[in-house]
Image: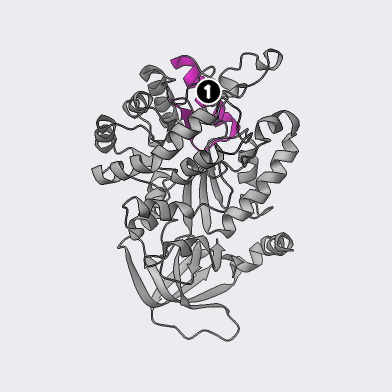
């Protein structure tokens, strides 16, 4: 019934955007200043914020009105590392050989709605089969409910690397994938792989600069690209208007990625002081994904959940991520919010706020890392991350002050995206 209700809301999108909508916000977050504004009126038209005024304005009797006087109201959150096509389970490694693209697509629609209802109105999808591109388009056209998606499409790896799509296959199915499939082994192939992502409709580029935890491969942290290969990818990406994210656990591969010009480091598990200093110098952001680290460490203790080759990596890497984040934050490394949702259950993204706070980051800074900071990276600093005139009407609300109880962010009371209310 919930899905049917949401779909009805989407079908009425044009009508809803044509209405003038008013919100009385008891506490409204100014993400630029990091302060709460009290007793505010937000006016919305055509899916955008038209005004933010002090005091509770008198509302016309026939207007669309939401009383959030007892709520803490914020701009919708952005998660900069999700995987909308999948959700790990004990059968995930077999499913890629069993499920048809249509099966993956139907699952992705479910995950998209769950993510939106959890208060994440924008996400960056960092790797799938390409169905994530179709999902983005379907959401943008109002066919299905979900967050605004910026997607890398298929990640780029080296042969046998973390995102080689044939890892774990038998010899008949393994083949020799190349740039079209997201596998590149030279600067020239790296450039070609970026151009294939552009051709397929991606919004950004993701590379796997080191081994990974969940891939069916022995090493979870070795470097897997040369600096020359990474530079070829980032330079070509810049030509096409892409920014580049780099999955990285091991320090050497991480350092190469930053030196090669990537914009964000995902996970950063074994990050050294040297790499931290380079990231500060180059304004390269760390995307912590602490929630995923904790999840894989826990699931590694469940017999049969992961293949045997994955278990030692999950036990070793998972527990390290939160500690690395704490050191990087203290050092001054730029931080942007990201969870790796899909490695754990979609809809639990907001747990990351608590883990970041637990590691030493004030709650207000965690909120900024999920609003104004990703807006800059996505070049949407004039459209998302703030409740402000001219911005998309992406507005969420909770029942308590998150600075006093950060776990309240896991229980959304109100979710609006583009002026359409999906949860209240």
Label 1 element class: helix
Nearest the viewer among 317 and 258 is 317
Q: Position of residue 217 (x, y in %)?
A: 54, 22
Quadrant location of the N terminus in the rendered image: bottom right
Pinpoint residue 234: horizontal percent, then vertical percent. Answer: 40, 27
Task: Tell whether position 124 is magenta.
Answer: no
Whether residue 100 sits left or right of residue 208 in the image: it is: right
- Asked which quadrant contains residue 365, the reply is bottom left
Give the x, y percent position of residue 70: 47, 78
Residue depicted at 53% across the width and 64% down the height? 411
The residue singled out by tag 1 in the image is: 193
Q: Is residue 205 magenta?
A: yes
Q: Is residue 125 visible?
A: no
**Whole-percent x and y of residue 166?**
62, 21
- The crowd level at tag 1 (other Cα within 10 Å; few <14, some 14-19, many 20+) is many
**Start-end of magenta stretch:** 186-210
């Amino acid at each position: 019934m919930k899905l049917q209700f949401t779909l009805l809301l989407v079908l009425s999108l044009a009508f809803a955007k044509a209405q003038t909508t008013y919100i009385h916000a008891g506490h409204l977050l100014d993400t630029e200043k990091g302060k709460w504004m009290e007793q505010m009126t937000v006016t919305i038209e055509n899916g955008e914020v038209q005004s933010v005024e002090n005091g509770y304005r008198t509302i016309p009797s026939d207007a669309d009105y939401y009383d959030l006087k007892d709520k803490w109201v914020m701009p919708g959150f952005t998660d900069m590392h999700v995987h909308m096509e999948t959700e790990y389970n004990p059968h995930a490694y077999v499913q890629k050989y069993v499920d048809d693209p249509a099966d993956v697509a139907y699952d992705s629609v479910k995950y998209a709605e769950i993510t939106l209802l959890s208060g994440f109105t924008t996400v960056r999808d960092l790797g799938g089969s390409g169905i994530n591109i179709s999902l983005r388009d379907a959401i943008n056209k109002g066919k299905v409910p979900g967050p605004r998606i910026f997607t890398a499409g298929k990640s780029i790896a080296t042969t046998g690397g973390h995102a080689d799509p044939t890892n774990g296959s038998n010899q008949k199915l393994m083949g020799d994938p190349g740039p079209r499939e997201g596998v590149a082994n030279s600067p020239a192939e790296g450039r070609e792989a970026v151009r294939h992502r552009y051709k397929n409709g991606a919004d950004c580029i993701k590379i796997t600069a080191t081994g990974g935890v969940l891939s069916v491969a022995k090493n979870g942290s070795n470097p897997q690209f040369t600096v020359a290969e990474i530079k070829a990818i980032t330079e070509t990406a810049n030509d096409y208007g892409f920014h580049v994210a780099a999955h990285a656990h091991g320090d050497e591969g991480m350092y190469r990625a930053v030196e090669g010009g990537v914009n964000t480091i995902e996970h950063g598990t074994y990050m050294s002081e040297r790499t931290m200093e380079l990231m500060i110098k180059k304004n390269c952001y760390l995307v912590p994904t602490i929630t995923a680290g904790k999840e894989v460490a826990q699931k590694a203790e469940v017999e049969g959940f992961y293949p045997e080759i994955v278990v030692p990596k999950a036990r070793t890497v998972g527990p390290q991520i939160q500690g690395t984040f704490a050191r990087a934050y203290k050092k001054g490394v730029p931080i942007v919010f990201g969870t790796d949702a899909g490695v754990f259950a979609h809809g639990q993204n907001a747990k990351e706020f608590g883990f970041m706070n637990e590691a030493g980051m004030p709650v207000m800074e965690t909120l900024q890392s999920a609003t104004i900071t990703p807006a800059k990276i996505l070049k949407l600093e004039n459209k998302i991350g703030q409740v402000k005139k001219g911005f998309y009407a992406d507005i969420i609300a909770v029942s308590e002050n998150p600075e006093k109880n950060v776990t309240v962010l896991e229980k959304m009371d109100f979710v609006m995206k583009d002026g359409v209310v999906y949860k209240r």
